[in-house]
Image (cartoon, rainbow, N blue to C red):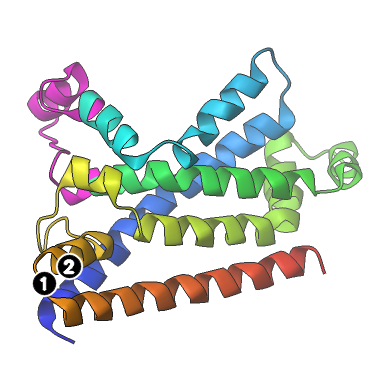
Amino acid sequence: MTEPILTTLLLTGKIAGVAVAIALIAGVGAAWFMHRLQFPGRSLVDAVLTLPMVLPPTVLGYYLLTLLGRRSPLGQWLEEVLGIRLIFTWQGAVIAAAIVAFPLVYQGTRAAFQGVDRQLEDAARVLGSGELRVFARVTVPLAWPGILAGTMLAFARAMGEFGATLMVAGSLPGRTQTLALAIYDSVQAGKDEEALLLVGITSLACVVILVLAARLLRVRHP
């Protein structure tokens, strides 16, 4: 395997890994919030949280450019005050991947929480456990197969993200070029053998993730 391809693989893993870590924290928190609380407009909030799953990636990329670009108030503040520039950086690719991966974690975790026996949670409260303790010691352990399955699917989605990443981070070899972007560039450049190798690696990784996720879901619903 040539060094540029290895670099692309490592960069893709780093971006997808960090993105999924962010999506996992945000997705579990949002799922718990939506699972436990009833409030007006709940269905609208749920739709907004799920929106990145159905929005065209280019639309999502446009939103991110508008929000984080150097001409936006937030983008200017990040660069001038904190010295952080997100456009055309791997950190920008992480944000794009995290947003598209978030709904998979959120939906998977929410479904897993709904499958937890409420009586077990209530019994823990009767025994004196607070809400955080019930969440950490009862809800999450019982829901972990669904949470992990959703996280694995989110990793596959983050690894294959193309449109939003291209608009926000570009396709800079060794800096922001992920597997999906490298495949596109290889096809455009007529490097068919390289494109075929990258496609094979991506396809194999996604198949493995899907098989493992299916097994985890069978653990949850034997």
Instruction: Give the quarter of the image for residue 195.
Output: bottom left
Vertical position of residue 148 compared to residue 28: above or below: below
State the residue in front, 151 or 181.
181
Q: Residue at x 57, y 35 (%)?
A: 30
Left or right of 46? Residue 162 is: left
Please tell me whether mark 2 sits on a helix, a strand or a loop.
Answer: helix
Left or right of 90? Residue 83 is: left
Q: Residue flagged by tag 1: what amino acid is it?
A: Gly
As for residue 150 lying within the magenta part, the answer is: no
Q: Are marks 1 and 2 in contact (CB under 8 Å)?
A: yes
Vertical position of residue 16 compared to residue 6: above or below: above
The location of residue 42, given as percent across then percent down, is 66, 20
Please tell me whether mark 1 sits on a helix, a strand or a loop.
Answer: loop
Instruction: Give the quarter of the image for residue 187.
Output: bottom left
As for residue 68 lying within the magenta part, the answer is: yes
Say which quadrant the C terminus sits in.
Answer: bottom right
10 Å crowding of disc 1: few (<14), some (14-19), many (20+): few
Q: Residue flagged by tag 2: what amino acid is it?
A: Val
10 Å crowding of disc 2: few (<14), some (14-19), many (20+): some
**Residue assigned mark 1:** 190
Q: Residue at x 17, y 72 (%)?
A: 7
Vertical position of residue 129 compared to residue 2: above or below: above
The residues bearing labels 1 and 2 have C-alpha atoms spaced at a distance of 5 Å
The location of residue 13, given as percent across then percent down, is 31, 66
Q: Residue at x 31, y 43 (%)?
A: 96
Say which quadrant the N terminus sits in.
Answer: bottom left
State the residue in front, 109 or 201.
201
**Residue assigned mark 2:** 187
Left or right of 97? Residue 181 is: left
Which residue of the protein is positioned furthest toward the bottom in this rendering? Answer: 1
- In the image, the segment drawn in magenta is 67-92
